[in-house]
Image: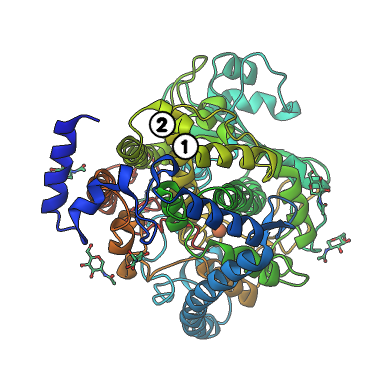
């Protein structure tokens, strides 16, 4: 190790008023003391026997049990596994009860407002009477500015695909067969896009969201379609806009922006019903199910004093409280899915099993890999997106996560060889692939770079990916009424020219219920409790167990998160009534708001 570098971090470490003795931290490499909980690599542990025994105890006590919330990754069991779950569940439940009590109070005020109004008699009532700052306890930040007023703007609908739910959209390649033909609305496309659909596709300007697979899932008896939709980059303005929506059920109508305003608005709402279901269940499969199983493999192979497990444990705070709760109140017979959504809880379980092999893959879902594979980033056959709000915010956070993990790994491992010689990490990789059955986990972890990638992605899952689709987003934007109902309450039309859209929207009690359910995922009080991304590694108890290099990296990470937060909090509408090119102001990925863990 470079001595100057070591001296530098020593000095910085000393001036950041860290707890505990600095010298003991400098000795971690060769001098780990079995009796304390200082972290160290196994090859430098002075008590290898004791350390190995402790791992054996864990291997007997943490076992892989059946998946929960649908058939995806294993859920912990065994005496130690059960105890961990019980502990997480009690932490999670305490928080959830406090949140629910806020919701119950707020909901009473909303009920009174609706009654005073004599019900919900217009779309405007859904946007105003149901909100109006009345969710001030459960959602003090309020809904995203513009999301309740500008929802008829096509740009709002299309840009939601690049912000609120960036996991469903992809760019079509020029070579592939068009997923659906436009039939007799084909001519109208020329008016909307100034190019034929084939020309758009050839130019790499055509995008798809495909929820047609939802047609096969069982429903609650409420109504919905299984929409697929084209979006495009406009050849003149460069705006990312909707082109057509096909229902894939009933008379399989294809709608375009040239339809009557009611028809087109209904088409977008039908799409949103499908997209909201996708977003909510996908978030479970793509984040919880993955983080949990990688962590379970780590618990069974890494010593509790391994620095990597110390970090993973932190990021997995209370995480195992969520799937049991979800089985009890969301996916249960008659639970929240069955009560509010179009597709029933059996469908939710089907979705989990169908999507886990895809969304649960590890490397394929790395931040840049995923976006590049879908033609959203660095695309070589079409123009770049003019604005990509999710990428704009997530990429800077991701970069800082990578910087942190890079410093962390560099400070513990002098060389790639030391990674190879870390037999606990090697056991973790084998365990993850062969016992935990993590999909697409790296086979060979023989360099620091591969390890950094694994950890950066893990952090991205707990600190960003989870919260784009879940946490606050459903109640502040992704699931707001009247534009994003979880189900429709009137059969979908067999022809166009629908006159009255109100019957499609949830009746008042259900509307309030939907908002309340999504508010239950919000975590308004976490900022005051330092449970946000900016504070992921500022807990003195954790820092005292980690080396100086990691302590320095942790404080830099925190500073960068606070900087990013200040920038996002300053966001407002520009002169065109836009923010990040969208007719609403999206502050979801604010590191002083985002939890650093799978909060809910
Ligand atoms: C869950 O999925 C796995 C992998 O597809 C399969 O082997 C297993 O039988 C399934 N378990 C259940 C309970 O359906
Ligand atoms: C979902 O719908 C299907 C088809 O109607 C039905 O068989 C299944 O029992 C339903 N699931 C629940 C939880 O009600
Ligand atoms: C819808 O109404 C318009 C005029 O109101 C009419 O021109 C059109 O043919 C109607 N379309 C259908 C499918 O009924
Ligand atoms: C949160 O962290 C700040 C320093 O970053 C500290 O001053 C404050 O006391 C902490 N609050 C809680 C509730 O731990
Ligand atoms: C072990 O770590 C915890 C924090 O996780 C700390 O409170 C405790 O003092 C440490 N114990 C020893 C012996 O270092
Ligand atoms: C945070 O912002 C301040 C002021 O703009 C800047 O001096 C500092 O370098 C930034 N820190 C990080 C880690 O980005
Ligand atoms: C969106 O809504 C906000 C607030 O209601 C308004 O100030 C802004 O101009 C709107 N933007 C567009 C493009 O309509
Ligand atoms: Fe979640």
Residue at image point 19% right, 53% down: 22
Apparent side of residue 299 relative to residue 180 in the rendered image (left or right): left
Q: Nearer the viewer, residue 582 or 528?
A: 528
Count of picture labels: 2
* Mark sitting on residue 418: 2
The secondary element bearing badge 2 is classed as helix
Image location (x, y in percent) of residue 74: 69, 53
Q: Nearer the viewer, residue 439 or 341?
A: 439
Residue 364 higher or lower than 247, as above or below: above
Apparent side of residue 261 relative to residue 496 in the rendered image (left or right): left
Image location (x, y in percent) of residue 163: 46, 43
Q: Nearer the viewer, residue 423 or 204?
A: 423
Mark 1–mark 2 CB contact (< 8 Å): yes
Q: Give the class, few, some or many, for how many residues have Cα within 10 Å of label 2's Cα (few <14, many ≥20).
A: some
Image location (x, y in percent) of residue 527: 33, 65
Apparent side of residue 497 relative to residue 25 in the rendered image (left or right): right
Is ligand 5 closer than 8 angstroms to the Cβ of mark 1? no
Q: What color scheme is it?
A: rainbow
**Residue 303, visible in the rendered structure:** no
Is ligand 5 closer than 8 angstroms to the Cβ of mark 2? no
Q: Give the class, few, some or many, for how many residues have Cα within 10 Å of label 1's Cα (few <14, many ≥20).
A: some
Quadrant of the drawing holding the N terminus: top left
Image location (x, y in percent) of residue 515: 55, 69
**Quarter occupied by residue 391:** top left
Residue 106 higher or lower than 458, as above or below: below
* Mark sitting on residue 5: none
The secondary element bearing badge 1 is classed as loop
Residue under pointer 1: 422
**Residue 222, visible in the rendered structure:** yes
User: Real-space Cα distance between discs 1 and 2?
Assistant: 6 Å
């Amino acid at each position: 190790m470079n001595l100057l570098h070591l001296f530098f971090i020593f000095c910085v470490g000393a001036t950041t008023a860290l707890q505990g003795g600095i010298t003991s931290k400098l000795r971690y490499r060769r001098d780990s003391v079995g009796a304390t909980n200082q972290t160290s690599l196994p090859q430098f542990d002075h008590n290898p026997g004791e350390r190995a025994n402790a791992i054996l105890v864990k291997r007997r006590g943490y076992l892989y049990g059946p998946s929960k919330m649908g058939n995806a990754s294993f859920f912990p069991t065994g005496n130690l596994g059960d105890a961990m779950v019980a502990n997480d569940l009690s932490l999670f439940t305490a928080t959830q009860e406090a949140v629910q009590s806020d919701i119950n109070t707020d909901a009473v005020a909303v009920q009174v407002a609706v009654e005073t109004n004599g019900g919900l008699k217009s779309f405007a009532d859904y946007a105003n009477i149901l909100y109006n700052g009345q969710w001030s306890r459960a959602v003090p930040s309020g809904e995203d500015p513009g999301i309740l007023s500008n929802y008829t703007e096509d740009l709002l609908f299309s840009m939601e695909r690049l912000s609120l739910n960036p996991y469903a959209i992809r760019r079509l390649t020029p070579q592939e067969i068009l997923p659906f033909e436009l039939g007799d609305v084909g001519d109208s496309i020329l008016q909307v896009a100034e190019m034929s659909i084939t020309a758009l596709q050839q130019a790499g300007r055509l995008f798809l969201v495909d929820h047609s697979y939802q047609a096969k899932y069982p429903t609650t008896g409420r109504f919905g379609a299984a929409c697929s939709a084209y979006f495009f980059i406009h050849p003149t303005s460069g705006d990312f806009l909707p082109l057509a929506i096909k229902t894939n059920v009933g008379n399989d109508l294809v709608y375009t922006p040239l339809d009557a305003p009611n028809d087109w608005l209904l088409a977008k709402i039908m799409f949103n019903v499908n997209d909201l279901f996708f977003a909510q269940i996908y978030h479970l499969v793509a984040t919880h199910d993955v983080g949990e199983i990688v962590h379970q493999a780590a618990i069974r192979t890494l010593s509790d004093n391994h620095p990597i497990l110390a970090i993973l444990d932190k990021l997995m705070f209370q995480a195992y409280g969520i799937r049991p709760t979800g089985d009890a109140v969301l996916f249960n017979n008659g639970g929240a899915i069955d009560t509010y959504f179009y597709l029933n809880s059996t469908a939710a379980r089907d979705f989990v099993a169908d999507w886990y092999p895809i969304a649960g893959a590890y490397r394929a879902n790395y931040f840049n890999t995923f976006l590049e594979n879908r033609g959203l980033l660095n695309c070589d056959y079409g123009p770049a997106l003019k604005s990509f709000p999710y990428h704009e915010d997530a990429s800077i956070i991701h970069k800082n996560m990578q910087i942190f993990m890079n410093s962390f790994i560099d400070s513990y491992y002098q060389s790639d060889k030391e990674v190879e010689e870390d037999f606990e990490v090697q056991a973790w990789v084998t365990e993850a692939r062969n016992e935990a059955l993590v999909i697409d986990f790296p086979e060979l972890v023989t360099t620091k770079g591969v390890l950094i990638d694994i950890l950066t992605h893990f952090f991205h899952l707990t600190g960003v990916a989870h919260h784009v689709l879940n946490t606050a987003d459903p109640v502040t934007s992704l699931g707001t009424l009247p534009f994003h109902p979880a189900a429709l309450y009137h059969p979908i039309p067999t022809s166009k020219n629908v006159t009255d859209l109100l019957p499609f929207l949830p009746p008042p009690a259900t509307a309030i219920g939907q908002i309340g359910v999504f508010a239950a995922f919000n975590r308004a009080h976490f900022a005051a409790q330092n449970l946000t991304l900016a504070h992921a590694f500022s807990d003195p108890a954790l820092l005292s167990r980690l080396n100086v290099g990691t302590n320095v990296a942790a404080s830099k990470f925190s500073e960068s998160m606070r900087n990013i937060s200040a920038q996002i909090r300053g966001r407002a509408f520009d002169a065109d009534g836009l923010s990040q090119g969208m007719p609403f102001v999206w502050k979801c990925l604010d590191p002083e708001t985002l939890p650093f863990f799978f909060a809910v």
